[in-house]
C-alpha cells in the first residue's frame, strides 16, 4: 500500500477502508509516512469529510495507537465526562465527587492546560500535597474504595492524536469535524469508560462559535461512540461568557467547594446538575434526569458530595481540611479592582479575552514549560445582565502585585466587556442534548 494512493482516493471523495485507515495511523506513529503526506491526507479529509464508519475506524485506530486502559477491575458502570474546553470550567472538580456520592464510580484521567488557565490537573495540584500521579493498582483500589479518583493522563494515550494534531495545527486543518471528533473520542475510548458524557461548548470562549456548529460536532462524536459500542450523550452549552465567577487554579477549586456546599453562582450550579443528571442516568443510578437531579441535590444538601471531595483529597495525599476550609488554598498577595469605563448593561464577556488576561498574570501557560502560579486569577463581579455605571467594579484581579502584567490584564478585561443601553435577553445555558435518538432542544 502507498500513501500517495490513499491521498488520491480521499482527494476524490471516496471512502477509505479500515485497512487503509490503520495504514495511515500506523505510519503517522512510526514516522514511516512523512509529515507532508500526512498533511496532504488531512487536507483531503478537511475538504471531503468522512462517513460515520470511516470516522469510527479512524477513532479506533488512534485509540489503539498507544495504551488502552482496561477499567473492568472497577465495579459498576464507569462514566467519563469530557468538555471541549471553556474559561472557568471547573465542572470536573464538582461532578466527580457529586456523582460518586450518588453511586456512579468516577475513574477519570485529565490533562494539563496550555493557554488560558490550567487544566483540571493543574487545578487539583493547587491543593497542597495532592498527588495526580497514581499507579494503576492504587488508582483502581481508590475508586473501588471511595468511588472516585482523578489523575493525570498517561503520556501514551492516543499518541497518533498528538502527532496528527500538531500537524493539523500548522496546516489549516484543525476545523475538520471528523478529525476533531476522532481526536476527542480516541482519548475517551482509550481511557476505558463504559459510557461517555460530552460537554460541547459554543460561543466566544469556545472553539465552535455557534450552537448549530456545536451540534454538528456533537452528532459526529455521538455517532462514533454508538458505532464502537459506548453509550454517548452530548450537552450543547453556552460559553459566551466565563462559567461561574472565578478563573484561576486555586480560585476554581474554591468555587467548586462553594457549589458542593450548596452555594456558588447559579450558572455553574445549574450546569453541574444537568451534566451530573446525565451521568447518573448513563451509570444506571437513575431512571431519568428528574430522579437523577433529586439525588444530586440530596447529595449536596446532606453534605455527602462535599465529604466525598474530602475523601478524594485525603486519599491522594492532600489536606482534606481544605474541603471545609478553602481559605487554606494558595492566596494571591494583591487584589486589584478593574473598573468600568462606561455606563450600561453587560451584554457579553469575551471569555477568551478573560482567559488570556488570567494567563498574562500567571494563571496559565503560554508555553509547555511555563510554571503556573496557583494563587492568581480573575474574579468576575459583573456578568451578563448586570447594570453598571462608570467606575463600578467589573472584576477583581487576584495577582502578585500592581505591576505591568496586572495593568495590561486589567485593560484586557475592560475590553472583554460588551455593554449596551438595554438589558439583554437571557441566553439558555444548555442549548440542546444530543444522543443516538436525536437532538432535544
Image (tube, helix red, strand yellow):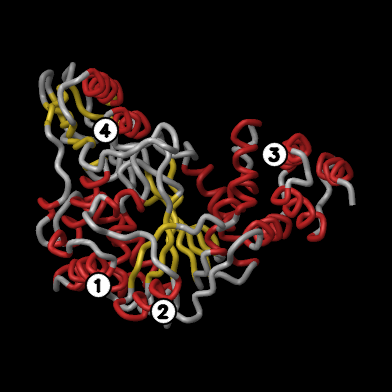
Q: Which residue is mark 3?
A: 46
Q: Say what secondary structure mark 3 lies in.
A: helix
Residue 281: quarter of image:
bottom left
Other-residue count near label 4 (Cα within 10 Å), few / some / many at <14 / 14–19 / ≥20:
some
- Which of 129 and 166 lies nearest the eye of the viewer? 129
Relative image position of residue 143 (x, y in whole percent): 36, 75
Image-based side of 156 in relation to 31, left or right: left
Q: Say what secondary structure mark 4 lies in.
A: loop
Q: Which residue is mark 1?
A: 294
**Res 161 visible:** yes
Tell me if label 4 and label 2 are in contact, CB under 8 Å: no
Image depth: mark 3 or mark 4 in front: 3
Q: Which residue is mark 4?
A: 424
Tell me if label 4 and label 1 are in contact, CB under 8 Å: no
Residue at 59% in and 47% down: 162
Earlier sequence position, callout 3 versus callout 2: 3
* Above/below status of 141 relative to 128: below
Q: Which residue is mark 2?
A: 284
* Above/below status of 20 relative to 238: below
Residue 375: quarter of image:
top left
Question: What is the CA distance from the residue labelled 3 to the residue labelled 4?
Answer: 37 Å
Image depth: mark 3 or mark 1 in front: 3
Earlier sequence position, callout 3 versus callout 4: 3
Residue at 46% in and 48% down: 84
Earlier sequence position, callout 4 versus callout 1: 1
Earlier sequence position, callout 4 versus callout 2: 2
Amino acid at each position: 500500500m502507498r500513501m500517495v494512493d490513499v491521498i488520491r482516493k480521499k482527494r476524490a471523495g471516496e471512502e477509505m477502508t479500515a485497512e487503509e485507515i490503520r495504514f495511515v495511523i500506523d505510519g503517522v506513529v512510526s514516522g514511516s509516512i512523512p509529515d507532508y503526506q500526512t498533511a496532504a491526507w488531512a487536507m483531503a479529509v478537511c475538504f471531503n469529510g468522512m462517513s460515520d464508519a470511516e470516522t469510527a475506524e479512524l477513532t479506533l485506530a488512534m485509540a489503539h495507537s498507544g495504551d488502552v486502559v482496561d477499567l473492568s477491575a472497577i465495579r459498576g458502570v464507569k462514566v467519563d465526562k469530557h468538555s471541549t474546553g471553556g474559561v472557568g470550567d471547573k465542572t470536573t472538580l464538582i461532578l466527580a465527587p457529586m456523582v460518586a456520592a450518588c453511586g456512579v464510580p468516577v475513574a477519570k484521567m485529565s490533562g494539563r492546560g496550555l493557554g488560558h488557565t490550567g487544566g483540571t490537573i493543574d487545578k487539583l495540584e493547587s491543593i497542597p500535597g495532592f498527588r495526580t500521579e497514581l499507579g494503576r493498582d492504587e488508582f483502581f483500589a481508590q475508586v473501588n474504595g471511595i468511588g472516585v479518583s482523578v489523575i493525570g493522563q498517561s503520556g501514551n494515550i492516543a499518541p497518533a492524536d498528538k502527532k496528527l494534531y500538531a500537524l493539523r495545527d500548522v496546516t489549516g486543518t484543525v476545523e475538520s469535524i471528523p478529525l476533531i471528533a476522532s481526536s476527542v473520542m480516541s482519548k475517551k475510548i482509550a481511557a476505558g469508560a463504559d459510557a461517555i458524557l460530552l460537554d460541547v461548548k459554543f460561543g466566544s470562549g469556545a472553539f465552535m462559535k455557534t450552537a448549530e456548529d456545536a451540534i454538528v460536532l456533537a452528532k459526529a462524536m455521538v455517532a462514533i461512540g454508538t458505532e464502537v459500542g459506548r453509550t454517548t450523550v452530548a450537552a450543547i452549552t453556552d460559553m459566551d461568557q466565563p462559567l461561574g465567577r472565578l478563573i484561576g487554579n486555586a480560585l476554581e477549586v474554591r468555587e467548586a467547594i462553594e457549589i458542593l456546599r450548596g452555594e456558588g453562582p447559579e450558572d455553574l450550579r445549574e450546569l453541574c446538575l444537568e451534566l451530573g443528571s446525565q451521568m447518573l442516568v448513563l451509570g444506571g443510578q437513575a431512571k431519568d434526569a428528574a430522579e437523577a437531579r433529586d439525588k444530586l441535590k440530596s447529595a449536596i444538601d446532606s453534605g455527602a458530595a462535599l465529604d466525598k471531595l474530602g475523601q478524594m483529597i485525603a486519599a491522594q495525599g492532600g489536606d482534606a481540611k481544605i474541603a471545609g476550609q478553602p481559605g487554606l488554598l494558595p492566596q494571591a498577595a494583591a487584589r486589584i479592582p478593574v473598573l468600568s469605563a462606561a455606563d450600561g448593561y453587560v451584554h457579553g464577556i469575551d471569555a477568551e479575552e478573560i482567559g488570556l488576561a488570567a494567563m498574562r498574570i500567571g494563571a496559565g501557560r503560554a508555553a509547555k514549560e511555563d510554571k503556573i502560579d496557583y494563587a492568581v486569577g480573575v474574579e468576575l463581579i459583573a456578568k451578563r445582565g448586570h447594570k453598571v455605571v462608570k467606575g463600578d467594579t467589573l472584576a477583581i484581579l487576584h495577582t502578585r502585585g500592581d505591576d505591568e502584567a496586572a495593568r495590561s490584564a486589567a485593560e484586557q478585561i475592560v475590553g472583554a466587556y460588551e455593554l449596551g443601553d438595554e438589558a439583554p435577553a437571557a441566553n439558555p445555558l444548555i442549548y440542546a442534548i444530543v444522543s443516538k435518538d436525536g437532538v432535544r432542544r
